[in-house]
Amino acid sequence: MRKLFTIIASVAILAFAGCAGASSKPVAANNPFAGKEVSTYLVGSYMKTKAVKEKLTAADFSVVATYKPVKKGTTIVFTNDALKAQGAKPGRAYAAVLRVFVDDKAKMISFTNPIYFGKAFMQDDFDYDVFAAQLDAINKAFPGLKESPDRLKFEDLAGFHFMMGMPYYNEPDILAEGTNEELLAKAKKYKKGKYLVFALKLSDNSTLLGYDLSKRTKKFVKKIGRQNAAILPWTIAIENGKATALNAKYYIAISYPLLDMGGFMRIATVPGAITKELSKPFKK
């Protein structure tokens, strides 16, 4: 009986912990990350926001926006033509930008890893060469970057979900429906544009928006780790007559892969609050 209980407990732990459902598409032969863990972030020595932006521009990236997710911290959102081309593919808008968090308090900078988020957001459309080129450009412009302790196995990124019953990448929140023009106009008009951080056109059928959250809601970053504050601003994809956002339970978990159940319980009300806030601009 004790042996049977142990087996049942082991199965339950496997079902409820971590990620599941690796991509079925074969991994590119030239991908050195195949079968290995990929760091979520690339961490480097501190430099001021202005200096980071100048280096990004010199590396042929375009700065889309700067944003204050926490006190004494700035997220710089950036892109280039290759990233926008990937994001223009159906359902892949979130892959169009990368981010770097400049922490004036902890005196460090932290980039979102193009391989990690590229695979997570592009799923089976992931093109290793495109995202490896972004990683190479970042490393050349910012030498000495180190891998963060946050990480997941490459093959698990596309099928990631936190635990049984939690959403996958392809289960976003549908905020509203209408023509792209109507949805974009509402997002820009709401509160006279107070919450709109950026609007990045990817194609005639898709636009990626950066959106602010209320001061109360975005405090979750301080509770579970300001070092990963590049998670903000939240993004909204307007594509083919729908406004969607990554489900908060998915996006928080993929951005904080070291977060355990206890950590999630500390911010239990946050996912619902985020969906509610992002839906407000599109109400009639």
Image (tube, rainbow, N blue to C red):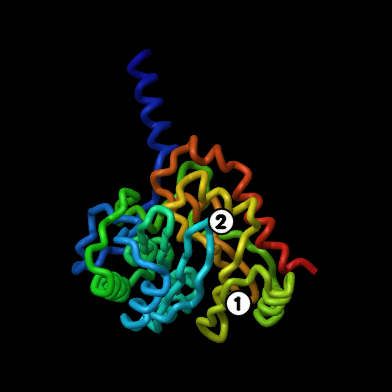
Residue farthest to the top, as pictured? 1
Mark identifier at residue 240 = 1
Is residue 115 visible in this depiction of the protein? Answer: yes
Q: Residue at x 50, y 55 (%)?
A: 251
Viewer-proximal residue among 131 and 22: 131
Task: Give whichever of 166, 209 is nearer the camera.
Answer: 209
Tell me which numbered mark, 1 or 2, is placed earlier along the sequence.
Answer: 1
Tell me the quarter of the picture where residue 1 sits: top left
Q: Amino acid at mark 2?
A: Asn
Res 213 → quadrant? bottom right
Q: Residue shown at 43%/43% (left/top)?
A: 259
- Which image quarter holds the C terminus? bottom right
Circle 1 packing at 10 Å, graded few (<14), some (14-19), many (20+), is some
User: Would you say 280 lies left or right of 163 here?
Assistant: right
Mark whose residue sits in front, 1 or 2 = 2
Labels in figure, total? 2
| Residue 252 x, y percent position in the rendering | 49, 52
Q: Which residue is identified by label 2?
A: 247
Tag 2: Cα neighbours inside 10 Å, few (<14), some, or many (≥20)? many
Instruction: Say what amino acid the circle numbered 1 marks.
Output: Asn
The picture places residue 243, in percent across and down from the top left corner, at 63, 69
Q: Residue at x 74, y 70 (%)?
A: 191
Location of residue 265 with respect to 120 vertically, above or below: above
Indicate left or right for 89 with 239 as reference: left
Real-space Cα separation, disc 1 to disc 2, in angstroms: 19 Å
User: In the image as oriented, which residue stretches furthest toward the right?
Assistant: 284
Q: Is residue 249 left or right of residue 119?
A: right
Q: Secondary structure at mark 2?
A: loop
